[in-house]
Amino acid sequence: MHSDNLASTRDDMIAFIEGHGMKRIPGHAGDDVPSIVWDDDENPDSWKDFVETAKAAGATFITMSEAVLEKEDVEILIEEVQDQSYSLDMESSSSELDEAQSLVNQVGRIGHIQLGFAHQGIMFLHELSTEWYERYQQLLDSVDDLGSVVFEDEDEDEEP
């Protein structure tokens, strides 16, 4: 279980990476890059093992990115969830709206950190997220999924 703000973990990561004589590059490996995600959810300090593995693999740098929840992001999400509830009148929209509104308490906090290093054409990644950030992503996905369904239905109605 991780705290609600990964800022102190990020600071520890920076010190640990630099302590191993490695450089940090601000960057995020996207979905289009061949990658392997480090899978050790049981160990809260598995990122240390990841950094040591990068060094053992001969990496001289590690990419590092973080996601900070911005006020505008929460406002947009709340708006989209409200629009969704008006268009579909779903009971679950009420709880989703409550969840979206509760994210206001997380504004300014780091919810996700990604570390990465390239080795033999593959990007090795370590990702760390808070529970609220994972739920934020789920809410975004549900709003996006609904939007594509609504637009697909409208397109089908417009065909001659």
Image (spheres, rainbow, N blue to C red):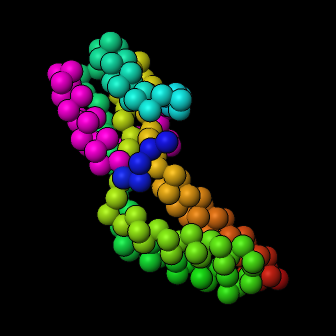
* Residue 39 magenta: no
* Viewer-proximal residue among 23 and 132: 132
The reply to whether residue 36 is visible in this rendering is no
- Labels in figure, total: 0
Q: Pick the residue in front: 88 or 69.
A: 69
Task: Check if residue 11 falls in the magenta segment.
Answer: yes
Q: Residue at x 35, y 48 (%)?
A: 6
Q: Position of residue 156 (x, y in %)?
A: 79, 76
Q: Quadrant of residue 11?
A: top left
Viewer-nearest residue: 31 or 109: 109
Above or below residue 4? Residue 16 is: above
Residue 96 in which image quadrant: bottom right
Q: Is residue 148 left or right of residue 129?
A: right
Q: Position of residue 19 (x, y in %)?
A: 18, 24
- The relative height of residue 82 versus residue 8 in the rendered view (above or below) is below
The part of the chain drawn in magenta is 6-35
Image quadrant assignment for residue 115:
top left
Find residue 74 and report its horizontal and vertical position in percent: 44, 72
Q: Which residue is at a point 65% across and 73% down the rendered structure image?
A: 95
Q: Is residue 77 above or below residue 20?
A: below
Q: Residue at x 28, y 35 (%)?
A: 13
Please name the residue shown 38% across and 21% down the image.
49
